[in-house]
Amino acid sequence: MFEAHTFSFQDAGLDGSAVPVETSVPVGDAELPDAIQLIHRDYRCPLYVWFAEGKRKDRQRQPQPVWFIYVEYRRGDGSRASRVLERPRTGPLPAALWHELATLPLADISPAQCRANPVRRAQG
């Protein structure tokens, strides 16, 4: 079981635009953006990454705070695909996370579609 809450731009003090991030630069919780556009190292195309706060119950059925990290990209037919990572919310996200995101294997990714029509924040 989990409970997720979207991390808002206002909570992070941002204006709502995606933030490009160098994969070598760690970001602490206080600076965590709602969404970033990250260039994948192997596929050489933009990925849309966003974060949600949530909780996951441990073996003792106690809720533990976690980050749900969504990585969105395009398939060959232009449709969106995503992969979700989960990390404990016990302090700043580790610097190694940015490297992991930039090298994450992504099923059915189309670098050409990602470059031609990058995934962006949904309007609404």
Image (cartoon, rainbow, N blue to C red):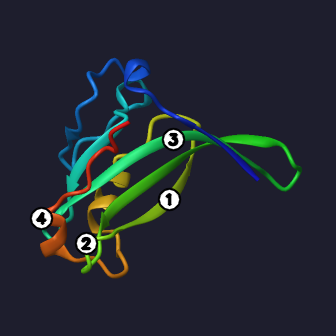
Q: Which mark is residue 78?
A: 2
Q: Closer to the N terminus: mark 2 or mark 4?
A: 2
Is residue 88 placed above or below 59 in the rendered structure?
Answer: above
Kindly identify the residue that appears in the image at 33 percent across and 59 percent down. 101
Answer whether residue 3 is visible to the viewer in this image. yes
Kindly identify the residue that appears in the image at 10 percent across and 65 percent down. 116
Instruction: Give the position of the C terminus as an image quadrant.
Output: top left
Closest to the camera, between mark 2 and mark 4, is: 2
Kindly identify the residue that appears in the image at 22 percent across and 77 percent down. 110
| Local secondary structure at mark 4 | helix
Mark 2 vs 1: CB contact within 8 A: no
Q: Amino acid at mark 3?
A: Ala
What is the distance, in whole Å, between disc 3 and disc 1 at their CAs?
A: 11 Å
What is the distance, in whole Å, between disc 2 and disc 4 at their CAs?
A: 11 Å
Question: Mark 1 — residue?
Answer: 85
Q: Nearer the viewer, residue 66 or 28?
A: 66
Question: Mark 4 — residue?
Answer: 115
Q: What crowding class fits label 3: few (fewer than 14 Cα within 10 Å), some (14-19), or many (20 or more)?
A: some
Closest to the camera, between mark 4 and mark 1, is: 4
Q: Is residue 87 left or right of residue 37?
A: right
